Image (cartoon, rainbow, N blue to C red):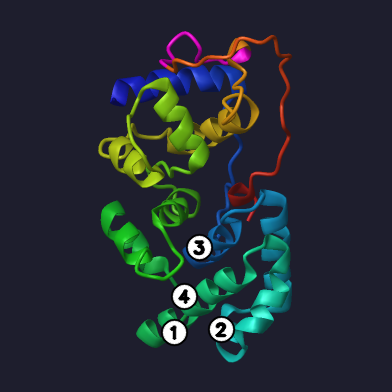
Amino acid sequence: MNQEIKKIDKLLVKYFDIPKRNLNPPPPIDMLIATILSQNTNDNNSYKAYINLKEKYKKWEEILNVEREEIEEVIKIAGLGKQKSAAIKNVINELHKKFGKINLDFINELTDNDAVSELICFPGVGVKTASCVLLFSLGKDICPVDTHVHRTLNRIGIVKTNSPDKTFEAINKNFPKGIAHQFHTNLIKLGREICKPAKPACSICPLVKICKYDEKNFEKRTKSRIDALLLLDNI
């Protein structure tokens, strides 16, 4: 699988280029909150919700003294406000209770598996959210798996799994060094622009020659790029 991932990565980079990334990433606690906000919504709305939070609360400690409903109102543009405000409030409260401060820097000292296990102990934080913190905040060689990554890798034939978490487990056992960010980001672009759930644009797909998907769609499509905000590289 390691060599297959490298081959896919080269083809994606040739088509999409190497994506820009944040050279001054935020601390893990900021990235965790941003990733919670990104769940089940588009990056533009979750980015606005994150900015609203940062403008309202200059320090995360301020959230200790506010009601969940206030947080919900601040982040409402991201959707699922009740669930997300509860998750954020809980993370802040639990960190303060356990360590006396709102800080997740200690996870950088853990193995990737242990760091993921530590983060998913927080209600509302799953494997994808945890792995995004490791990749986008700490630069770890770990590839988060959302619905786009899960769908595209199954269609290509790298994995045969029935959930994003199973795909994550399969590809991260021995992930190639140094390419996790570009691989993850370019697969999301592929899933958004080309390998869509219905009627994938196989005629313009850079992976068509190696893809094992049986229901390819070769309707003529023109190449188009969605210049969408990628939230976690802009926090």
Where does the N terminus fall, quadrant-wise?
A: top left
- 72 left or right of 146 in image: right
List x then y, in percent, for residue 126: 41, 58
Mark drawn on residue 91 = 4
| Residue 96: mark in rendering | 1
Which class describes the residues within 10 Å of circle 1: few (<14), some (14-19), or many (20+)?
some
Q: Amino acid at mark 3?
A: Leu
Q: Which residue is mark 2?
A: 61
Amino acid tagged 4: Val
Residue 61 lies, in percent from the top left, at 56, 84
Question: Where is mark 3, residue-wise?
Answer: 32
Tag 4 and tag 3, C-beta contact below 8 Å: yes
Instruction: Provide the secondary structure element on which disc 1 rests.
Output: helix
The chief SS type of the magenta part is loop
- Contact, CB < 8 Å: mark 2 with mark 1? yes
**Could you classify mark 3 by the number of other residues whose Cα lies within 10 Å: few (under 14), some (14-19), or many (20 or more)?**
many
Q: Is residue 33 left or right of residue 75?
A: left
The magenta segment:
204-212
Q: Amino acid at mark 2?
A: Glu
Residue 50: image quadrant is bottom right
Residue 9 appears left or right of 202 = left
Query: Residue drawn 73% across and 22% down?
Result: 224
Calculate the distance from the C-alpha at mark 2 to the C-alpha at mark 1: 8 Å
